[in-house]
Image: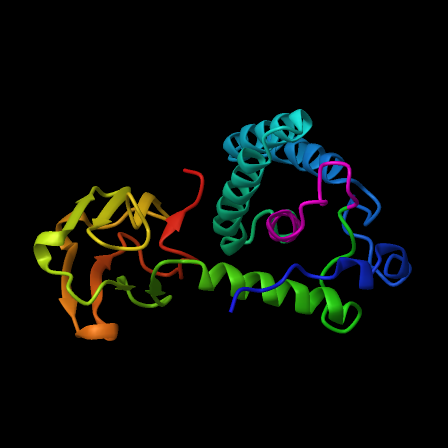
Amino acid sequence: KPLSPLPFQRCPLRLLRHSAKRMAGLSPDDTVEEALQRFAATFKEDAQGAELAQLTEKAVEVLRLEDDRETAVRLVTELRDKLHQARRLGRFVEEANVVERMAGRMRMDESYIRTSAVGPSIDQEQNPEMAEMLKQIQQADKECRPYEFFNTVDQTEMTVNIPVPAATAMKDVKVKVTAKTIRLEVAGHDTQPCVIDGAFFGPIEEHAFDFHLEGSGEKRILVLDLEKKKEGSKWPDLITYGA
């Protein structure tokens, strides 16, 4: 069942600000635009942060237009995904946490815009309502995917299960895969023109890619078998949105 819009009015930021911890160089009262500008400056100071800085500034630019929310949300989501990778290496951890919260609220709350306050950090004990909000956002994000994705830190092998119509045959599946991208089409699938179309979260071994069909009736699924080029990390998703 789809989640209904979250009642942010029940948890006004003014009631949370006194208990919120001040983030490094960032206040809960800072706006989305101010936070992103500060992050862009931080990224520019890092030798490996040029791409993040450019993406952040592009997101701010589109947010200022105020007439293309879809693109703005896509850019902030892409920034979130790239920061996930950096956070896994111990870099830009706070920035990643804040942008993750921004991306979630932008997707769930149309009134959350560039002039909105960033708000306090999500702390389970201090802000249980906002922590629950983030949990619901993450669950909704998972449920909206047209597939199930399985991978672990210590294995390079990955599996994707995609529910497909009962009558689906191999001839109905069209897939184009490179080491960095995938485009998958399934005739008769609810998601058209393609079920998956984007850049992988990281590079894969192209030669190791394979797919097959399993099950029947309502349990009919298309199974994708993939292999990461590098082990030692768990991907948050199969693809990087906005790539």
What residue span does the magenta drawing correspond to? 98-117
Q: Residue at x 67, y 29 (%)?
A: 66
Which quadrant of the view contains residue 235? bottom left
Where is residue 125 shown, x and y percent of the image?
A: 76, 74
Residue 155 at x, y = what percent? 29, 66
Q: Is residue 104 above or below residue 225?
A: above
Left or right: residue 207 versus residue 134 is: left
Which residue is at a point 58% across and 35% down the rendered structure image? 72
136 vs 119: above or below: below
Against 223, residue 110 (above or below) is: above
Residue at x-position 52% and y-position 39%: 74
Front residue (pair 32, 72): 72
User: Which quadrant of the structure image shows residue 236?
Assistant: bottom left
Q: Quadrant of residue 112?
A: top right
Q: Tell me if residue 208 comes above or below residue 194 in the rendering.
A: below
- Residue at 72 percent of width and 64 percent of height: 130
Q: Quadrant of the C terminus?
A: top left
List x then y, in percent, for residue 220.
Answer: 21, 70
